[in-house]
Amino acid sequence: MELLPQTVWVIGVVFARVGALMMLAPGIGDQFVPQRARLIVALFIAFTLAPVVSGKIGPVPTDSGDMFLAILKEIVIGLSLGLTTRILFSALATAGAIAGMQSGLGMAMAFDPSQQQQGAVFGTFLALLGTALVFQADVHHLFITGAAKSFDNFLPSAPLPLGDIAQFGLRAFSQAFALAIQITAPLLLFGIVTNIALGIINRVAPAIQVFFIAQPIQVLLGIMLFAVTAGAGMLVWLEAIAEAGRSLN
């Protein structure tokens, strides 16, 4: 009975960090996943990690204010870890928007479960494909072990490292934009060449509505090029998100 309050405190601290991470984690943190399922997963991971990290968590605070601040700090750390993966997943939505504009399907919309809103149809496809690849390649294991290792990098008793969290987030943002460009680089080149060619033809024969005539051909070629190059682009993205998971470890 003397150990019960400390045990509950350790589980609560771990659950605060892991639960916040699960709120933003791709796949399990999407809006269509029932809240009860997310809660069960977070509790299961918290009960699993609690014995591993119990030595890094201090005793139960005697003051309720200190207890509240400690839990709040764990939630902030968990949200920052989950936000990193969510930012990298947003690269797929950006890549889908670029692919839609270059292929002439920029106005074709579908519900994107990773963004919880309407998005380009290419972005929705890439988000679903990315979620499947993450679970198929067991990349999510890296983030679960990273949550355990985060108790070494961000000790509960240490001050909140706001500078490190901000730097980590900025690096994730820049990497997400770079990944979006890498995934859609062939389509960007295709769009530039196509628009230049259509512009030249329009100048040579202004009476011909060349943009309306070429629109179906542009859509068809854009879809074919996307189908051929999407696999290589997704492998680049998967390696980047796996590297982000390894960096947490």
Image (cartoon, rainbow, N blue to C red):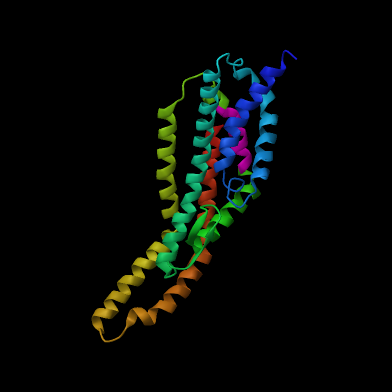
Q: Position of residue 223 (x, y in %)?
A: 49, 70
Residue 48 image-quadrant placement: top right
Is any part of residue 61 visible from this angle? yes
Q: Residue at x 60, y 19 (%)?
A: 57
Magenta span: predominant SS is helix
244 vs 209: above or below: above
Q: Tell me, yes or no, whether the highlighted magenta stretch contains residue 142.
A: yes
Task: Name the spot of residue 249 as percent of width and height, x first.
Answer: 56, 31
Residue depicted at 46% across the width and 21% down the height? 159
Q: Is residue 138 left or right of residue 212?
A: right
Q: Quadrant of the N terminus?
A: top right
Q: Is residue 222 left or right of residue 135?
A: left
Q: Residue furthest bottom?
A: 207
- Residue ID at (62%, 36%): 144
Residue placed most toward the observer, 212 or 11 = 11
Bounds of the magenta span? 140-150
Identified at 44% across, 47% down, the residue is: 176
Does 233 lie within the magenta span?
no
Q: Is residue 186 visible?
A: no
In the image, taking residue 243 as reference, residue 28 lies left or right, namely right
Within the image, what quadrant is residue 68 found in? Answer: top right
Could you say where residue 73 lies in the image, as x and y percent from the top left?
51, 27
Residue 103's x, y, as percent?
43, 69
Figure check: 227 above or below 67: below
Q: Is residue 105 above or below residue 167?
A: below
